[in-house]
Image (cartoon, rainbow, N blue to C red):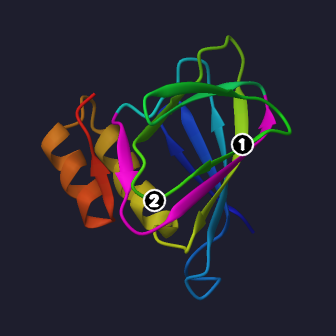
Amino acid sequence: MPELINIGALQLKFLQSKETTGGSIDLFEMTLQPNARMPIPHYHESWDETIYGLSGVSTWRIAGKDIDLGAGETLFIKRGIVHSFTNRSDGPASCLCMLSPGALGPKYFKEMAALLACGAPDPAKMKEVMLRYGLVPVAS
């Protein structure tokens, strides 16, 4: 059964993880409510990310360029490329995200959800968690 993780206005449904695939991939569906966003631009040190739009439109900022992702469209984010995302529309947007090789699993997202559940998150603690899992935050 897929595992659901809520992080504010984001919901992740883990379909496969590094634990279930022997480290090959992490695969999850992400739903972004209107105005949901990844507030910290970042890059990954050791994995690539492929995004497939399922519904709605999300906007991905990749290497300084905004790209709208709609249903049936894909994006590839090579490791080392700075990126973030947002939902600027007035309806939910969902996408399928695949990390290869698998690097995070649900644990990273659960830790971030716990930090955000405490009200105003501590940026230093968020940065520490991100770095521990191989996400490198970049000043916007």
Residue found 53% across the figure and 44% down from its top: 6
Q: Between disc 1 and disc 2, whose residue precedes?
A: 2
Along the horizontal axis of the image, is 108 left or right of 52? Answer: left
**Picture disc at residue 35:** none
Determine whether the residue tagged by mark 2 lies in a helix, strand or loop: loop
Image quadrant of residue 99?
bottom right
Residue 52 on the magenta segment: yes
Residue found 43% across the figure and 29% down from its top: 64
Q: Which residue is mark 1?
A: 95
Residue found 51% across the figure and 69% down from its top: 105
Separation (CA) of disc 1 from disc 2? 19 Å
Q: Position of residue 122 (x, y in %)?
A: 17, 38
- Residues shaded magenta: 40-55
Going by the numbered disc 2, the residue's amino acid type is Arg
Going by the numbered disc 1, the residue's amino acid type is Cys
Q: Position of residue 125 (x, y in %)?
A: 17, 48
- Single out the residue that lies furthest toward the right: 72
Quarter of the N terminus within the rendering: bottom right
Residue 39 on the magenta segment: no
- Labels 1, 2: front one: 2
Q: Between 97 and 29, which is closer to the camera in this rendering? A: 97
**Picture disc at residue 79:** 2
Q: Position of residue 80 (x, y in %)?
A: 39, 55
Predominant SS of the magenta segment: strand
Quarter of the C terminus within the rendering: top left
